[in-house]
Every structure is written in C-alpha cells, then in structure tokens.
Image: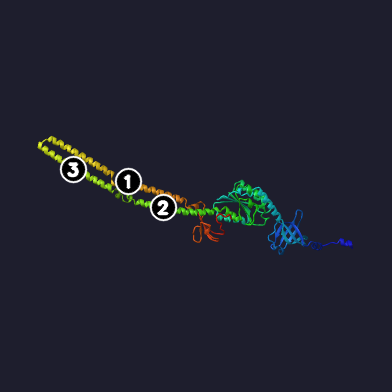
C-alpha cells in the first residue's frame, strides 16, 4: 500500500496544485531586494519584470491596483525593494512573486557617491570660477551633445531658429542615461575639441530621477568638460536639478531651452543697437541735409550768382567814365591840333611856305593817327579786361564748379549713410523686431509683455512670433 503511494503517477495539474498548496502559504509577505530586468508595461496597466541579482532571478507581476500609487515608473537597471507573496502560475507551471509594494533602493548610495566626487573635484579646482571660459558673443557654430530624439533637441532648435541668425548647428548624438552613456558623452565632447567643430557646446538632457541624470555625475564626463578648450553650457534636468557637469561647465543653464537662449542672447543686444543706430543715423542725415540745403540756398542767393551786375556795376560805370574822359581828352587834343593847324595854315598862307606847310600837315596827321590808335588800343584793352559777358561767364563757371564740388560731397555722404543704413544690414543676416499691435520697433524688453505678438523682419520676409518669456539684460536665465 505504501509502495503504491510512492509510485503514484500524478498529472501535471495535480503536481502543480500540490506544489502551489505547499509553496504559497509558506512565502507570504516576504521582502526581496534586486535589480529590475525585462520590464514590460501592459496596456492593462500591469507590470511584468524579473528581479535578479548576480546569480539568480525570479519572475514578478505588479498589478495595476497596487502600482498606481508609484511616483515614477520603474525601468530596467533599477535597484528596488519589493514586498509580496509567492505564487505558482499554473498555466506555465512557474512560480512568481505577486508584488504589493515597491520601493526604489540605492538613492542613498548614489547621493554619498555624488558627495564624495564633488569633494574630490573641488580639491582639484574643477569648480574654480577663474578657470571658466567666457562664452562667445556671436557663435557661428553651435555644438549639441544630447539624445537625437526627444524634446531637448527640439526645444534647442526652436529657440535658436527664433533668436539666432547665420549659425551652424552640429549634433553629436549620444545616450543620456543607462550603461555607457557617460562614456559616449565624454567622447562626444573630446571629438568636438579634437576637430574644432564648434564655437560653443551645449550638453544636457531633460529632467528625471537621480539615477536618470547619473551619467552627468560621472568623473569621466567632468574630466572631458574640464579639459575642453571650447566653452561649455551645461543644461541637465530641470531648474532644481544640479549635476557635476553643471558645476564644472563654464556656465550652467536651468533647462536646455535656457541654454539655447544663453548662447544666442547677444542677438537682442544687436537689435537694440541697430535700432538706436538707425535713429542716430536718420537724425544725422536730416541735420546734414538741412545744413547742406541751407548752404545751397545761401550760395544761390549770393549776388555773384543771382545778380552779377550788382557786383560789377561799379566797374562798368568806371569803364564808362574812363571812356568819357578819354573821349573828352581826345576831342580836346584834336581840337587843339586843329587850332594849331589852323594857326599854322594861317602862317603859311601869310608866309606862303608851301613845302613847310605840307610837311607840317603830314606830321600833324601822323600824331593824330598815333594818338588815336593808342587811345583806342588802351580803351580796347580795358574793355577786354572788363568785358561784361566774359566776366559774367567766368564767374558763372566758378559758381558751377563750386556747386559741383558741393553736389559731389553731398552724394558722398548719401553713399556713406546708405552703406550703414540698417535696412541694408538685413542683407547681411541681421533682423529687426516690430510690435504687431502698432508696428513700432522693439528696442527694449520693457516694451514687450508675455504673450505679445511680435514680427521679426528679415531680408526676405517677416516671421511672426509669440513672447513666451522675457529675460532682461544681465540675467543668466
């Protein structure tokens, strides 16, 4: 009878039920610590994963009714402490742990490790402000070290496309959590430096737990940042998260979007400067044009240009007076000679000296012609010297030369002012911001408020944008 009991043949269901009745009552409310692997989250909300250590593993199930109060979702690699009941899953003939409570383990150890690394790096002057490099004001090449997927790279791109112009973005994609992430991040930083690919680097990722952010707390990443010749902005996690990379980097940004704003903040200063320069140039141009216009008006009102006869009237009258005097002298001279001739003729008639009379007459004619020619030559010389039309023409030519010189100088100023006109600067890659409400130029952060609509004028069109955040000059956020 006993032999028959020993040699009884069980069905699979019978032996499974027997094991279930023996196993389950013996392992209720047990607590186990291990590492999660093969984590799966079903659409029903139930979690299935294995709990393992260096030598063994056990299957677990964490039903939705018990896991809905977790503050964060478990993942592969998490060290956890679970409490539950052992159970046999008959359809597969396997045992598993049905979890009632789960706690994350290892955070205290990570914090201790983080504190020790901070103290070590502090003694090596990794956090010294004197060694931090200034960021370039107008970076042309911006390097990014982060995951190629997710919101971080999209946020950085959105900010840079809105705030910066004429820049080249280079992404070195890396893992930002899990095994090997720290090594990839450090190698990406060294590659950027080795090949001089960027003017400034942004490294970072979105928010997460201490375990998620841990690659940025590794010494290999801190060494790469410390040795970098390229300025680095660290943007790891949220504003309240601080990592080793934040402390070693040349500047820390509270978020990846803020990092993009930091490297492009000078664009706002350029816009303000250009707007101020435009007003100054416009004012200078108006003053210069008004001055030149008045000079031109004064010049055209000069007697030399507008009334040349008023200037030369005295000379003309002097010529006329001189001619009259010459004419009087000539008449007097001729009259005197005629009288002398008459007297001589009377004498000749009286003495009948025919030959002497003829000679005297010839001499008299000679003197008359000589004097007349001299007087006429002198008068013609004076007339040529003071010729009204020639003098007027000469003065007119001088005035034209003076006006042409002034016109050339005005054109030169026009070309200079045109060359520095802010509108032409748009062709060089700059932009001007206008308020959509009234079309006024935005010159200061004080002119805008959150949710204001703005227009950014570029060389080939207008971009409409919405103000989400305002960072006054001098802030690091």
Could you tell me which secondary element the residue under label 1 belongs to? helix
Q: Which residue is mark 3?
A: 332
Q: Residues under labels 2 and 3: Cα distance? A: 63 Å
Could you tell me which secondary element the residue under label 2 belongs to? helix
Say if mark 1 contacts mark 2, CB within 8 Å.
Answer: no
Does any portion of residue 77 appear in the rendered image?
A: no
Could you tell me which secondary element the residue under label 3 belongs to? helix
Quadrant including the N terminus: bottom right
Does any portion of residue 416 appear in the rendered image?
A: yes
In the shown orientation, is residue 373 left or right of residue 142? left
Q: Residues under labels 1 and 2: Cα distance? A: 29 Å
The numbered mark, 2 or 3, whose residue comes first in the sequence reads: 2
x and y, in percent, of residue 460 in the image: 51, 55
Q: Residue at x 27, y 48 (%)?
A: 314
Mark 1 vs mark 2: in front? 2
Q: Residues under labels 3 and 1: Cα distance? A: 37 Å
Q: Which residue is mark 1?
A: 394
Q: Picture quarter containing residue 259?
A: bottom right
Q: Nearer the viewer, residue 192 or 218?
A: 218
**Any mark on residue 16, and which?**
none
x and y, in percent, of residue 432 in the image: 51, 55
Quadrant including the C terminus: bottom right
Q: Nearer the viewer, residue 69 or 133?
A: 133
Say if mark 3 contacts mark 1, CB within 8 Å.
Answer: no
x and y, in percent, of residue 308 in the image: 31, 49
Q: Name the colour scheme.
A: rainbow
Q: Which residue is mark 2?
A: 289
Q: Is residue 103 above or below residue 428?
A: below
x and y, in percent, of residue 98 in the image: 75, 62
Mark 1 crowdedness (10 Å alpha carbons): few <14, some 14-19, many ≥20: few
């Amino acid at each position: 009878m006993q032999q028959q009991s020993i040699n009884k043949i069980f069905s699979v269901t019978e032996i499974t039920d027997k094991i279930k009745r023996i196993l389950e009552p013996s392992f209720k409310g047990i607590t186990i610590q291990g590492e999660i692997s093969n984590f799966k989250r079903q659409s029903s909300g139930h979690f299935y994963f294995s709990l393992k250590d260096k030598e063994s593993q056990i299957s677990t199930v964490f039903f939705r009714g018990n896991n809905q109060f977790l503050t964060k979702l478990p993942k592969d690699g998490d060290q956890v402490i679970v409490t539950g009941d052992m159970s046999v899953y008959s359809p597969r003939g396997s045992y598993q742990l049905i979890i009632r409570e789960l706690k994350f383990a290892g955070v205290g150890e990570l914090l201790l490790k983080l504190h020790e690394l901070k103290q070590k790096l502090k003694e090596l002057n990794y956090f010294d402000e004197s060694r931090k490099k200034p960021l370039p004001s107008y970076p042309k090449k911006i390097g990014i070290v982060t995951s190629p997927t997710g919101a971080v790279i999209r946020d950085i791109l959105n900010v840079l496309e809105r705030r910066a112009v004429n820049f080249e973005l280079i992404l070195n994609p890396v893992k930002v959590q899990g095994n090997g992430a720290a090594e990839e991040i450090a190698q990406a930083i060294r590659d950027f430096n080795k090949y001089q690919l960027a003017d400034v680097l942004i490294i970072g990722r979105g928010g997460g737990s201490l375990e998620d952010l841990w690659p940025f707390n590794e010494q290999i990443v801190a060494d790469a940042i410390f040795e970098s010749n390229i300025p680095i902005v660290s943007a790891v996690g949220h504003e309240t998260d601080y990592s080793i990379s934040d402390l070693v980097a040349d500047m820390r940004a509270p978020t990846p979007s803020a990092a993009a704003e930091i490297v492009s903040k000078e664009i706002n200063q350029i816009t303000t400067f250009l707007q101020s320069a435009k007003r100054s140039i416009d004012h200078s141009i108006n003053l210069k044009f008004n001055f030149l216009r008045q000079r031109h008006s004064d010049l055209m009102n000069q007697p030399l240009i507008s009334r040349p006869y008023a200037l030369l009237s005295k000379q003309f009258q002097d010529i006329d007076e001189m001619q009259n005097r010459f004419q009087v002298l000539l008449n007097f001279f001729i009259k005197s000679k005629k009288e002398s001739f008459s007297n001589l003729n009377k004498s000749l008639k009286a003495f009948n000296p025919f030959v002497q009379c003829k000679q005297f007459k010839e001499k008299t004619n000679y003197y008359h012609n000589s004097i007349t020619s001299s007087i006429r030559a002198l008068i013609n010389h004076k007339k040529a010297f003071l010729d009204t039309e020639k003098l007027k023409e000469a003065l007119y030519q001088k005035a034209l030369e003076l006006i042409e010189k002034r016109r050339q100088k005005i054109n030169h100023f026009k070309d200079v002012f045109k060359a520095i006109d802010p509108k032409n600067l748009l062709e060089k890659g700059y932009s001007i911001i206008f308020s959509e409400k009234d079309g006024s130029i935005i010159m200061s952060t004080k002119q805008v408020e959150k949710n204001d609509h703005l227009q950014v004028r570029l060389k080939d069109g207008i971009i409409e944008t919405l103000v989400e955040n305002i960072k006054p000059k001098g802030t690091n956020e």
